[in-house]
Image (cartoon, helix red, strand yellow):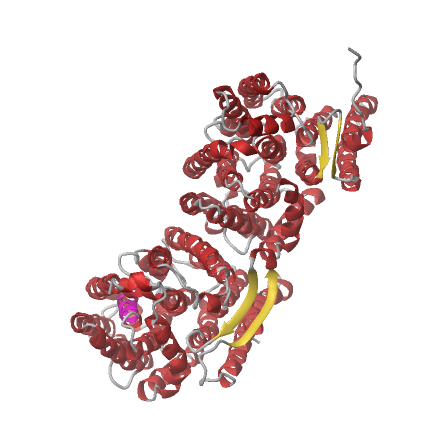
Amino acid sequence: MLSLVTFLPLAGVLAIIIAARNNANTARYIALIVSLATFVLSLRLLFNFDTSTAAFQFMEESTWLPAFGITYRMGVDGISLPFVLLTTFLTPLCILASWESVQKMVKEYMIAFLALESFVIGVFCALDFILFYILWEAMLIPMFLLIGVWGGPNRVYAALKFFLYTLAGSVLMLIAIIVLKNTGGTFSIPDLMNAPLDFNLQVWLFLGFFISFAVKVPMWPFHTWLPDAHVEAPTGGSVILAGILLKMGAYGFLRFSIPMLPDASRYFVPLIFGLSLVGIVYTALVALMQKDLKKLIAYSSVSHMGFVTIGLFSFNQQGLEGGILQMINHGIVAGGLFLLVGVIYDRMHTREIAKFGGVVNVMPVYAVIFMLFTMAAVGLPGTNGFVGEFLILLGAFLANKAVAVVASTGLVLGAAYMLWLYKKVFFGIIHSEEVQALKDMNKRELAIFAPLIILIFWIGFYPGPFLEIMHTSVEQLLTQSHTIKAGTNAVAMY
Amino acid sequence: MPVQMPDINLGLMLPEILVALLAMALLLLSAWYGKEGRGTIGWMSILGIGLTALAIMASGGSGETTFGGMFVDDQFSRFMKLLLCVSTALPLLISLNYVREHKMDGGEYYVITLFSMLGGMIMISSGDFVMLYLGLELMSLSIYVLAAFKRGDVKSSEAGLKYFILGSLASGILLYGISLIYGSFGSVSFIDVAQGITSAHGHLSPAVGLGMVMIIGGLSFKIAAAPFHMWAPDVYEGSPTSVTALMGVMPKVAAFAVLYRVLLIAFPGLHDQWGPLLQFMAVLSLAVGSFAAIAQTNIKRMLAYSAVGHIGFLLIGLATGTSDGYQSVLIYLTIYIFMNTGAFALVLILNQDGIGDNLTDFKGLAKKRPYLAMLMATFMFSMGGIPPLAGFIGKLYVFMAAVKAGMITIAIVGVLFSAVSAFYYLRVVKYMYFDEAESPFSMEVSATSQAVVVLSGIIMLVWGVFPGSLLAWTETTIRMFQ
């Protein structure tokens, strides 16, 4: 079942190669149908998911490379399932959004997109470290091509920077994984969660993982690849980057750092908090100064992900659940915002904020939808952003009051740049003919946003079902994070 | 004193005899044929290599020796000789067109290639230093000639001469080292040397250490490990591309086989000495391979430096001194043959249009010839060690072996350099996919080149995801060194 969800998009790649010789529309339809089918299949996972246990479900195991202890092992728990769903949910939307905006090499675009989906789902399902690493890295290839081939004017630079930055981060993780295997005796992720580890070793391993995940999240000061990549990527690529790829880093912290290296994770809390706080405030300030729509949202992503890492490392139920929920929220909201920018970019072919103004007069529906997403990004009560950020701040407050106080300034700044952006783009008088000629959204575009808007309010008013999925797993994670794995010597350090 | 005739079992040498006879027969035939039908010689030599491979597979690999221990036939020699056949046949297959177009197909091109392969086979099966030297010289001399094969071309002649002079120097160093070893132990047999070292109980004369270092140095020249890599970029660039493709893989297989024999059979007791030496060369090779390649604009030079980097990874595996490490080297080497030949096949295909030597010649290939570009991208990503391609599997096992052997620092250095090297591989992909086409790419792709490229591409994918067969195979090969 899990393998089917993971590899169905790859089957779609084959189908496109075989069926869509030179026909762009065939490629589009195959990609859409396959990604929708994947989504439906992943919903079946959700309905059959047992929320009462923290164990991995839908486990699949088969021998792969027994000589080296590498097994094909897949499974999901309450922490990974939401991300799988987020991926399968966003991909068809991205394909719809690229329907008309991508005109060159359509077939290759769809191939890259489906391959990307497959690898990303695999990353969230993999329970063997090598399998995880292979998929984690494999994902770079389609993303590199997406940015480089279909991106904006500065795409080559952005693509290379994205690839090399993330690769340089991940290679150290490979060494950490191999060292873990040598001490723990296995590549199996669930088994390694219970393996005892010396404190010093934990610290080194944590650093190895940290660089890789921090680049991906991205945490300040490892974030510099992100504005370039986001701005230059095509709309679909930006959505996947913001909505899903950023989550992989935080997922790494959740899945590996905290349960496997609990002592080191607690030891490094000040570092994580410090970097996150700087990230929240600094990137929010930077966002205030942006002239480019996409760049503003890109910087706001870094700021929002700072909240997430604070939540994860506050080591309490509220913070962790808030962190995970906020990742989902950010996937929906930032993804939606990038899609919205894509809508206007397709019409005006510019993203410069100063070129707009008075758009509300010609695109009223668009303005309303944009408003909804702005409110969600700001964290207005009733939207999903509020629930996530509130939980995180609650958790942070329990862990460290000062951190919570500083972090909440990020909310104020967030409101400032989002509202400022909204004012500049939508209000005021129309001062260019291009804006005057704008047409409001068509049905295909509305269809993309409808599910996103439903989710914004659903999570905003009734987050219960979403939190319930992760509840038991988070509880277990908390127990794991409070166990002392390193033996008595290290305990003295606290 | 009566002369003792050693027990000679020619059956063990059947593959070598086959190649020698074939080469000589083809030399006569090419004179017979004249200008027409020279392509046939090429096909016959490839067919002959195929037959040799069958003969190798049929051989026992039982560890028997002949000529008084000078010639060994064991599992390792079997594996390496098969690898050698592949690494000779694939470059030949992709260069049939090139050789014809550049009027290099005067029969002797193939004959000399066969002789160099014969030298490589003798190296692989050598049981003492004299046999090693004989094989090495036969192989090297043939390749010097091949490098200078485009007689009218200054660059080709220069490459041949440069390779010859530096290669002779390296051979001299190697010989000097061998004579020091002979002087210390009174024997050139690998087994006798190993016994001499064990029975000395650590009280060895400095001459042994010096001899060993010189032997390693001489062999390092053949694999182009830094700091003995200086010849590689110039020779790679100047030689006819078909020869470069051969030079990139075949001599390396043979030289690595010899390194195994020398280090693991003659000098296993000195691992404490040669281990750090190899580690040092490995790190240096990685550094040279990663940084120097960035500055290259010629793809043959770039691939030369990239080869130096790959040798760095192979040396890490060898330096571990564990069977895991030895196995990882074989895995990496096997994979390397296919990705390197695949990349050169693309260069050769582009050469038909009179382009392909410069990196910028690849601009826009993806739009005009999407499948060729996809395959080239596969080889580049594989060389960069990006999963799920085979190059990653090779690197993974090298790093696993290194970490297991406690060489974590080296492993960290290795992965960092592999991230650096990803840059220049990506640049090729960048040219192909992100830039607009400048050349028409109108060339025809011959069926043989197509077959080799597609085969290598498929192997990259299959071994990247299911390397099980390769692992099992190398594991049985390496068992004899435990």
| Residue B165 image offset from top left, x and y in percent | 55, 17
Position of residue B51 relative to residue A143, above or below, is above
Q: Which residues, given as a range, are shown in magenta?
A: A301-310
Screen quadrant of the N terminus of chain A: bottom right
Quarter of image, res B76: top right
Q: Which residue is drawn at 48% across and 40% down?
A: B360
Screen quadrant of the C terminus of chain A: bottom left
Q: Does the magenta stretch include residue A38?
A: no
Q: Is residue B52 left or right of residue B178?
A: right
Q: Does the magenta stretch include residue A307?
A: yes
| Residue A33 image offset from top left, x and y in percent | 56, 75
Q: Nearer the viewer, residue A427 or A121?
A: A121
Position of residue B365 relative to residue A140, above or below, is above
Q: Nearer the viewer, residue B456 or B35?
A: B456
| Residue B220 image offset from top left, x and y in percent | 53, 29
Q: Is residue A40 left or right of residue A195?
A: right
